Image: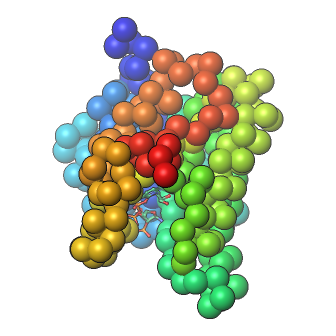
Amino acid sequence: MTALFDLSGRTALVTGSSRGIGSALARGLADAGATIVIHGRDAARAEATRLEMAHVYGEDRVFAVAFDVTDPEASAAGVAEAEAKAGPLGILVNNAGIQHRVPLFDLDPADWDRVIRTDLTSAFLVGREAARGMAERGAGKIINICSVQTDLARPSIGAYTAAKGGLRNLTRAMAAEWAGSGLQINGVAPGYIHTEMTQNLVDDPEFNAWILGRTPARRWGTVDDVAGPVVWLASGASDFVNGQTIFVDGGMTVVV
Ligand code: NAP
């Protein structure tokens, strides 16, 4: 049974894995046997995370690249660099993302563009570059990290909500075009997860109480909660799952 989840001999690029959820996903995939390419915009931070992981998994199993996922040329060069260092990609996790909290009436169009490019366009740019090689080899797993905002809106995060909703449909579009070439493309939609990105919300007593009341599991998610479903979707155990988005939210999106 465990062979179904074994990722030995597979190479995974996890965007935005220099910290936060992405770094936990990279560790989860490494625990399952994969060779990992750590990624971020900040090369020094990516290298620091690579070093930490290389102590655990070995220098020959952890690599690092740095590029801006909103830049088409940099994304193409970054995927090529990842493959040159670590070997052909069998797994891509599109995880890099940002949040920007401003009501729609006050939202600067430049900030709207920045969020859409980082949280949605990046998955198209990096995903397409990785998928070209995967399609040639007839196999590959792409996992797009969505959010409960894929399904649910909330005041002040309109651009993020639009991007994450779009990411679910991009996941379907990728499956429509690439499933026939042996790729599986799915989404994982985490609920409220305690990370740097959400520390200010955890520290806000009113918001924290709202989360605990709104989540049937009565807690914030942890980064490790998200790793299990990602390992499953990266493995042979999910070979006939395609175009789906799995919510990992303690039940938040199934209750009112
Ligand atoms: P985080 O701690 O802020 O980390 C973001 C990562 O993305 C960093 O590695 C950062 O690299 C990278 N990144 C951001 N913009 C980039 C760009 N333009 N080019 C390259 N890398 C870029 O975020 P997180 O909380 O772990 O969130 C990770 C993902 O999970 C996001 O897609 C987020 O929307 C999603 N999510 C989070 C939660 C939550 O509760 N935290 C819930 C649902 C979904 P640098 O440090 O080098 O900039």
Q: Position of residue 31 (x, y in %)?
A: 29, 32
Residue 208 found in image quarter: bottom left
Q: How many marks?
A: 0
Q: Position of residue 50 (x, y in %)?
A: 31, 52
Query: What colour-coding does the image apply?
Result: rainbow
At x 43% / y 34%, what residue is drawn?
A: 229
| Above or below, 197 relative to 193 | below
At x 50% / y 69%, what residue is drawn?
A: 98
Left or right placement of residue 15 versus residue 80 in this view: left
| Above or below, 13 relative to 30 | below
Q: Position of residue 88 (x, y in %)?
A: 56, 34
Residue furthest top as drawn:
1
Q: Position of residue 109 (x, y in %)?
A: 70, 85
Tell me the quadrant of ligand 1. Answer: bottom left
Q: Is residue 9 something one can see in this rendering?
A: yes
Left or right placement of residue 254 versus residue 158 in this view: left
At x 51% / y 18%, what residue is drawn?
A: 236
Left or right placement of residue 165 versus residue 42 in this view: right
Residue furthest left as drawn:
55
At x 25% / y 37%, what residue is drawn?
A: 57
Residue furthest right as drawn:
177
Front residue of 29 and 244: 244
| Above or below, 156 relative to 249 | below
Q: Is residue 143 something one can see in this rendering?
A: no
Q: Quadrant of the N terminus?
A: top left
